[in-house]
Image (tube, rainbow, N blue to C red):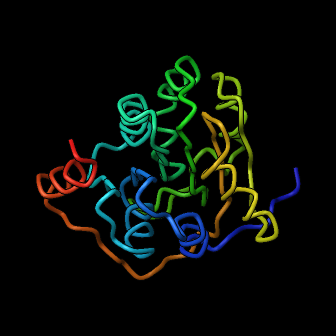
Amino acid sequence: MPRLPMLDRRAAVAELLKNRGDDLLVVAGLGAPAWDCTAAGDHDLTFPLWGAMGGAVPIGLGLAQAQPEKRVLVVTGDGEMLMGLGSLTAVGARKPANLAIVVLDNERYGETGMQRTNTGRGTNLAAVAKAAGIPVVATVGSPARLDEAVSLARTARGPVFVTLKIEPAEHELVLPPRDGVHLTQRFRAALGV
């Protein structure tokens, strides 16, 4: 299979969150997704994970069910998604129309030394999501198709699953706040709950 072109991770996440307003709730998976969401602009309605590998999609699913009038966007990495593949079956079974999942796939475990993940060995996360019952799936690696990926993630009736094929490059760390109680309280206060 020919290799897809790849996107710059930081630039892709910036486009994904551009002009987000206060109607988009974001769950940022641990590591690079949390750093990239913070680099795009720390926001009270972004909930970055500092741990709980594999937990981003289940948290996003619960949030989408609890806040059906708001768009929920999960931004996570391929390593974390591989850890939590079972959560895709829950998303496929419940089919929340307001949930979008974007996987930043560099085919590496960035947090532990850039070891190759199984997406670099043939595992197709979009095909897994489709098989799990998620109706809208896409894989995008070309900058020419990034607008399409952003549109799906931000506006398509979901659930939506988009794999962004990204370069395995390192970026400057832009860390979100580390205090879990603070992050929870600010998110809840911004939601008004």
Please give left or right for residue 43 compared with residue 83 in the image: left
Task: Name the residue at the bottom extreme.
Answer: 172
Pick out the residue farthest to the right. 2
Q: Which residue is drawn at the image coordinates 43% and 35% (left, top)?
A: 64
* Residue depicted at 49% across the width and 21% down the height: 90
User: Residue at horizontal 39%, vertical 50%?
Assistant: 27
Residue 84 found in image quarter: top left
Instruction: Please provide percent x and percent y for residue 21.
Output: 45, 63
Q: Please state if 92 lies on the left or on the right of 21 as rendered.
A: right
Position of residue 61 measured from the top left corner of the image (x, y, whole percent)? 43, 32
Query: Residue farthest to the top?
Result: 93
User: Which residue corresponds to the image point at 61% horizontal and 44% vertical from the top-left?
Assistant: 118
Q: Is residue 145 above or below residue 159?
A: below
Where 106 sits versus 76, above or below? below
In the rendered image, residue 185, in percent from the top left (x then y), is placed at 15, 52
**39 or 154: nearer the viewer:** 154
Q: How many marks?
A: 0
Q: For this rendering, which residue is in front, 101 or 63?
A: 63
Q: Quadrant of the C terminus?
A: top left
Provide residue 176's location: percent of width, then percent of height: 28, 68
Q: Is residue 25 above or below residue 159?
A: below
Q: Along the line of sight, which residue is nearer the eye, 27 or 116?
A: 27
